[in-house]
Image (cartoon, rainbow, N blue to C red):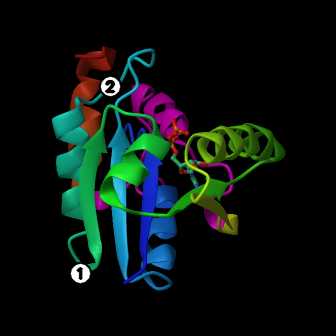
Amino acid sequence: MKTVIYPGSFDPITLGHLDLIKRVSLIFDRVIVCVMVNVSKHSLFTLEERMEQIKLVTRQFPNVEVDYSEELTAVYARRVGATVVVRGLRALSDYERECQIALVNKQIYPELETIFLAASEKYMYLSSSAVKELAAFGADLTDFAPAEIIPEIEAKYKDGRKK
Ligand code: ADP
């Protein structure tokens, strides 16, 4: 059984992330979406909130699981016995950063391969940061975030202030 890990911050999960999960779930037997705890990154949603959101919006995919890790991706992958990591590529700037991460991961865990899926055209410029910025301005999030979690995102920006 071939398992792939999809690590990220998912703060919050966007339609771009979900599109990637859907596509990768058709290629691999088992997909672990792993929320990486990044101490240097201030997040809008707690780890628990992010995991719940991902579980909710991926519930229709039977081979998708949600986990979290406070380790480096390579250390996590070795611990759970996975040898493939998937990341999404949007702009050229993603490419440089992602190659760097992939090389470091391979240095730590040489059996680990990183594969990249090109972002779908529709979501090429979509990021969690963009969703948060739009939400802060009270914009309609329908085209950017999964419908089930839009009220939660909007609630964080009620009265124009982050809760
Ligand atoms: P990180 O902080 O690790 O970059 P993100 O949650 O921002 O975490 O993104 C996780 C992964 O999903 C990254 O590989 C990123 O390039 C990819 N990704 C983000 N947005 C999109 C999108 N709209 N389409 C495809 N891949 C995306």
Q: Nearer the viewer, residue 52 or 146?
A: 52
Residue 36 % position (x, y) = 38, 37
- In the rendered view, does 79 fall on the left or right side of 24? left
Q: For disc 2, does the CB lie below 8 Å from ligand 1? A: no
Q: Is residue 154 magenta?
A: no
- Residue 161 in view, yes or no: yes
In space, the residues marked 2 and 1 are separated at their CA atoms by 28 Å
- Please say if 16 is above or below 104: below
Q: Which mark is residue 62?
A: 1
Reply above or below: 141 against 18.
Answer: above
Tell me which residue sits at (19%, 39%) in the image. 49
* Residue 96 x %, y %: 80, 40
The residue at 49%/75% (across/down) is 24
The amino acid beneath tag 1 is: Pro
Tag of residue 44? 2
Quadrant in the picture for the N terminus: bottom left
Secondary structure of the residue carrying numbered label 1: loop
Type of the residue with mark 2: Leu
Q: Callout 2: few (<14), some (14-19), or many (20+) C-alpha neighbours within 10 Å?
A: some
Q: Classify mark 2: helix, strand or loop.
A: loop
Q: Position of residue 35 (x, y in %)?
A: 34, 43
Identity of the residue drawn at 71% across and 43% down: 103
Q: Is residue 140 magenta?
A: yes
Range of the magenta residues? Answer: 122-147
